[in-house]
Image: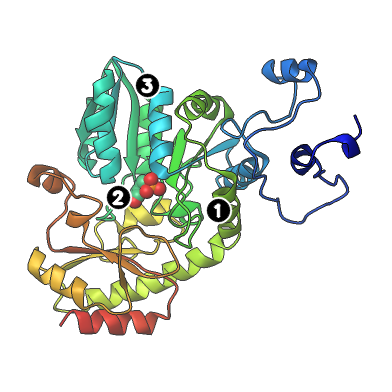
Amino acid sequence: MSSNDQGPSTRLIHSAVADPDVHPLVTPIYETTTFVFESAAAVQAYNEGRSSQYLYSRYGNPTVVAVEQTLAALDHAEAALVFGSGMAATASTLMGLTSAGDEVICGSAIYGGTLHLLQDLLTRFGVTVRFVSVDELHRLDAAIGRRTRLVWFESPINPTLQCVDIRAVASACRAHGVLSVMDNTFASPINQQPLALGVDLVMQSATKYLNGHSDVTAGCVTGPRALVDQLVPSRRLLGTILDPRPASALGRGLKTLAVRVARHNATARAVAEFLAADRRVTRVYYPGLPGDPDHRLAAGQMTGFGGMVCFDLGGSFERAAACFDRLTLVTRAASLGGVESIVSLPVLTSQWGHSDAQLAAAGITRGMLRLSVGLEDPQDLIADLDQALG
Ligand SMILES: Cc1ncc(COP(=O)(O)O)c(C=O)c1O
């Protein structure tokens, strides 16, 4: 049947043809849920892994694969997978790598969502979780048991910016045949390369620095192909892959990551120095300050100290909240890593719902403000903080 003989509904749906002679500079958004096959033999070849075709966007999509290639290159990794959020990446990783009866060791100072996923959800499926202090992470030989499958940690830690000795954790895990997985969200691959320090897998919330413009929610995991491939079934079955449109936005954000992070590093240091010199501030947490207890450790594993600064106003929630409310340029919001400076009170956001014991274990006080230093002019940020300190 020629197309002239077809009805208008059929012609509306089937007339568009992709032009094979178009060579775009930028990967287009393949905004399609599914892909066309020529024959049963072509589907069969796909099913048996003999074809590079795509089948269904929940399994994979060229726009998504393009950004995965960038992320793998950034981490010098064999493979990368992207997900619909950092938590989707975390959940898919944990479900892909653990089974009922396994134990996960996790730093007790950890992003709140990770803590609750492990403590409240994964335990319902027979995985046991042991939360350990940073000191215990540094003495992992004593903590790792017969059933330990995986160690999950982050460095610098949200929100206290405390650092974990990445090489020490990775080598203890390797010695015991246990997987090490690290959340590198705070540092970004520009400032820290955990795979090169021996970690097995790196997870990041791409919602933060990787995208950098506070308009995409995404996550990613990078590592050796044999391990990353073990996450493919859980991503497929949980349906946690990123959509092509936000994947394209993430790919665009990534192109400026190195220049953005260099500026975040410099401005955060200027802000941290201002706060450290101010008597109204009880304590500043920034591993780039020479006086920070983790400065030596950070300097041995980071090439830049990042854009996150945390400070304490005498442990007093009232003082922290008053300072928070008085800020005019720095925006009150959750999240971090965007071009605009953002402030949050950890006890109301990332650590909301933590018990006093959990807050203490994570080194968090009610007087803490967490600052994600953006790309504004440093003197304007410092002036805003100065007036807000009252
Ligand atoms: C350190 C860290 N890891 C993971 C996540 C979770 O990422 P997402 O919000 O993209 O799910 C966050 C979110 O704030 C985070 O700060």
Pinpoint residue 303: horizontal percent, then vertical percent: 46, 58
Rendering coords of residue 128 (x, y %): 24, 22
Judge: label 3 CB < 8 Å from ligand 1.
no
220 vs 381: above or below: above
Is residue 127 in view from this perspective? no
Closer to the camera: disc 2 or disc 1? 1
Question: What whole-number distance in Å separates the C-alpha atoms at marks 2 and 1?
Answer: 24 Å
What residue is rendered at 43% in x and 67% in y? 265
> In this orientation, which residue lies closer to the viewer: 343 or 166?
343
| First in residue order: circle 1 vs circle 3 | 3
Residue sitting nearer the eye, 274 or 142: 274
> Residue flagged by tag 3: what amino acid is it?
Thr
Mark 2, residues whose alpha carbon is within 10 Å: few (<14), some, or many (≥20)?
A: many
The kind of residue tagged 2 is Ile
Quick one: SS at disc 3? Answer: loop
Residue at the image point whose x is 59% and y is 35% from the top? 79
Name the residue tied to disc 2. 157
* Residue drawn at 44 percent across, 52 percent down: 207
Q: Nearer the viewer, mark 2 or mark 3?
A: 3
Please state the horizontal and vertical placement of residue 386, each as a whole percent of the image: 23, 83
On the picture, is 329 further left or further right than 25?
left
Residue shown at 70%/32% (left/top)?
Answer: 35
The answer to whether marks 2 and 3 mark residues whose Cβ atoms lie closer than 8 Å is: no
**Residue of label 3:** 98
Q: Which mark is residue 250?
A: 1
Q: Hey, what amino acid is under mark 1?
A: Leu
Q: Quadrant of residue 75?
A: top right
Of badges 1 and 3, nearer the viewer stands: 1
Q: Could you tell which of marks 2 and 3 lies nearer the N-terminus?
A: 3
